[in-house]
Image (cartoon, rainbow, N blue to C red):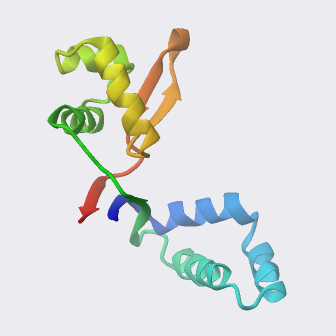
Amino acid sequence: MIEIKLIKTITGKELNENYEKQYGSIQKLAKLLEKDSENMKLFSDLKDWKFFGENPEEKINDTTTIMTDTLALTNLEIELLNFIKNENPKSIRELARMVHEDVSNTHRKISKLHEEGLLQLKKGTKNSKIPYLAYDKIEIGI
């Protein structure tokens, strides 16, 4: 089993904004915890929300872990991830031009990376898709 960690560094303020979207308010989270006092996620989220409420500029690594049996990244796919992170292409077509690759091949590679959870796609103009990375680094554990 291969473990892939997608890591984004955020501030306590950003984390608490995420909690607010998820729970509505710190009071609502506290009530949920009262009803389900054994729920460690609720307990941890409440503890973090309180801490980062007092320390909003504190940095934290927000990590998403993907477990997979297979991971085969080609040099081109690594190059695509690097270009997306550093050059912020406005479309898959623009990305293909940047890496001097065929658009259809680039589109296929981007679709694979998206399916594996290694990048995100948002809607662009005229039915285009904009690839982007929602994290700062990738760690692959073998």
Say whether residue 37 is left or right of residue 15: right
Direction bottom: furthest residue: 38
Residue drawn at (36%, 57%) of the image: 69
Give whichever of 8, 116 is nearer the camera: 116
Say whether residue 140 is left or right of residue 128: left
* Image location (x, y in percent) of residue 109: 32, 28
Residue drawn at (54%, 79%) of the image: 54
Name above or below for residue 105 compared with residue 10: above
Residue drawn at (43%, 68%) of the image: 57
* Image location (x, y in percent) of residue 4: 34, 59
The image quadrant where one finds the C terminus is bottom left
Q: Quadrant of residue 7?
A: bottom left
Say whether residue 30 is left or right of residue 80: right
- Please indicate, yes or no, whether residue 132 appears anywhere in the rendered image: no
The image quadrant where one finds the N terminus is bottom left
Name above or below for residue 45 compared with residue 62: below
Say whether residue 90 is left or right of residue 55: left
* Image location (x, y in percent) of residue 106: 30, 21
Total labels: the figure holds 0
Name above or below for residue 88 compared with residue 81: above
- Please indicate, yes or no, whether residue 20 appears anywhere in the rendered image: yes
Residue drawn at (59%, 84%) of the image: 47
Give whichever of 25, 111 is nearer the camera: 111
